[in-house]
Amino acid sequence: MTLYHGTNVDIEVIDLTKGLRYKDFGMGFYLTSDRPTAVRMAQKKARLFGGKATLITYELDEAALTSDLKVKVFPEKACVEWLLFVDANRDRKNTAPIHDYDIVVGPIANDGVVLQLTNYREGIYSPEQVAQLLQDRYLDQQYYFGTERALRFIHKTNVEIV
């Protein structure tokens, strides 16, 4: 399976400690199956941090998803379990990781989702209401790699400036 990483520099060796802590699935290395999403991320990172918009292509050995790794795959559409998982990972009050998965696959919490997460946190909507509001929205898929064991299943195949 082909996956993409949008960034502002080429990555020779993936360093899991460089990931940001309060992301959708926690601190780790993220890829997406959607090339345009990765290109937009690369352009955004280059604009914010300098460097060149860089698209790195990886191949995922899908055996990882059925191996002895601890893997969580959420449905492609928003659901309550995914929403609460993302909310817990993004909650800055949680100073320790909230899970021990090697790989997590699920929708990306884009800006529209973050707005609804805020509405949930402020008590405007229940998790069920937020998940329902997001049901008709297409959300790109992301792949989180949180351990060195998981990284063994991805291999860089291309780097291009976009």
Image (spheres, helix red, strand yellow):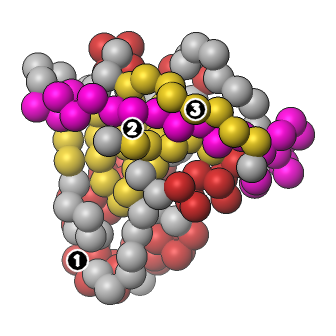
Query: Quarter holding the N terminus?
Result: top left
Which sits in the foreground, 26 or 14? 14
Between marks 2 and 3 in the image, the one whose residue lies nearer the viewer: 3
Q: Report the Cα–Cα distance between label 2 and label 3.
A: 19 Å
Question: Helix, strand or loop at disc 3?
Answer: strand
Instruction: Give the amino acid at mark 2.
Output: Tyr
Instruction: Give the amino acid at mark 3.
Output: Asn
Q: Position of residue 25 (x, y in %)?
A: 39, 43
Q: Is residue 161 magenta?
A: no
User: Is the residue marked by circle 1 packed among few (<14), some (14-19), or many (20+) residues within 10 Å?
Assistant: some
In this picture, which residue range is highlighted in magenta?
43-66
Instruction: Give the amino acid at mark 1.
Output: Glu
Which sits in the foreground, 59 or 48? 59
| Residue on which the image places disc 3 | 158
115 up-or-down from 4: above or below: below
Q: Report the Cα–Cα distance between label 1 and label 3.
A: 41 Å
Q: Report the Cα–Cα distance between label 1 and label 2.
A: 24 Å
Q: Position of residue 156 (x, y in %)?
A: 50, 26
